[in-house]
Amino acid sequence: MAQEWRRLPLNLRYGSTPGTRHNVTMPEVTITGRLHRGGELAPGHGVRYPGHPIALHLSADRRSVCAVDLDDMPFDPMFDFPAEAERLAGKNGDPDKDSPTMRYYHQRLWSGRLTGLKGNCAFSLTPAGAGLKDTALGRSFFGSESGLYLSSDRAIPKWRRKGATRRLRDDAGLMGRILAARPVLEYMGAIMMFPGHRIDGRQTINGAKGFHPKIADRLDLTVECIRLAYVGVFDHESNRLGPVLERYWDFFNLFDGFSGYVDFWLLNDLLTPDGQRIDFFLEGDIDKYDFSARGPLPTTVEEYDHYLDRAVAFTLKRNDRMVEAWH
């Protein structure tokens, strides 16, 4: 049970509008937060009191706030991030940007973790805007003197509204199975982090992954592109994300090769048993994936079902790995 420390008066007018910034003064720290829909005052960048991360919750009358010790928060990989984002930011809320719980889970999971990294310097991640900024590596990345910035990516698509799969979704049984898989594919096990820097105004990895017609936001195909990059294949014909990954290679070079990258991000269940290939989510995607020969979307109801079954199984297994890694 999270500890409520104390309730503090806020000089707020009744009905203060969402988006308004306010300061809350506590012993040893002044917290700047932004009032959200749903009655929560989200903390500013990396707030700690004293020595603990906290969340602030506004009272129903918007005149007092209680601080909750996040170090006491249990890890729930099945937390409903979309519901939290909608409560805080409205119906268009984006969990990757608007869920403080997701951001905190990322912070706890990936900070201090040495598995898979080169050397003995782990990330120390603190909230920065909608993502997390490293404060431990002490160097610039991609020309940015502010250090490494990571943003969240709900990495496994359902294609629930994608035009190219509309014909398949006319099957009522399939649509029911998509809706059943949807909450599972919002679990923490289906969420990744990638560098959030935009280099020279070009697409980020997250953006390229989502918009490339040969990737269609698929995590398994993205990790195949990363595997190819680790063996030096960056040309677009063979590796559709190769040029983008090459721009961000300073990040990938932090890991001890592809196996180190997989171990760090707990992607082990995305590989074949020998650990040498990607165990793709769609039937027929075995051995060497040929980006020029096939598209990334299912073409039959059976393929769609296979994709959903594999994606859900991977997410649940990665959830379990995250529970084991939680510290």
Image: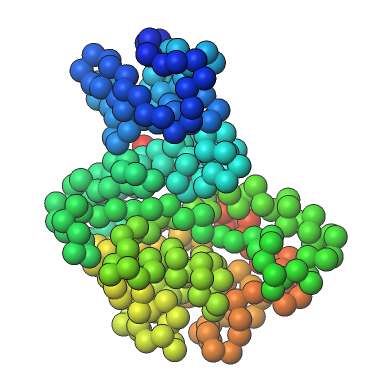
Res 213 → quadrant: bottom right
The residue nearer to you, when weighing 9 against 106, is 9
Above or below — where is 147 with respect to 54?
Answer: below
- Residue in view at x 18 percent, y 47 percent: 136
Query: How far across and how far down the image is residue 190, in percent?
Result: 53, 54
State whether residue 69 appears in this view. Answer: yes
Q: Nearer the viewer, residue 163 or 81?
A: 163
Is 153 placed left or right of 234 in the picture? right
Tell me which residue sits at (58%, 49%) in the image: 186
Q: Quadrant of residue 195?
A: bottom left
The percent coordinates of residue 301 (x first, y second) are: 78, 71
The quarter of the displayed image where residue 4 is located: top left
Is 156 located above or below residue 83 in the figure?
Answer: below
Residue in the picture at 45% in, 65% down: 207
Q: Which is more toward the observer, 154 or 75?
A: 154
Q: How many marks?
A: 0
- The residue at 30%/76% (across/down) is 246
Q: How is the image coloured?
A: rainbow
On screen, 38 above or below 291? Answer: above
x and y percentages locating residue 286 in the rendered image: 57, 80
Q: Judge from the rendering whether residue 168 lies leftward or rightward of residue 229; answer left or right.
A: right
Q: Quadrant of the C terminus?
A: top left
Looking at the image, is 33 positioned above or below residue 117?
above
The answer to whether residue 276 is visible is: no
Q: Residue 14 location in percent, x, y? A: 49, 15
Q: Residue furthest right?
A: 172
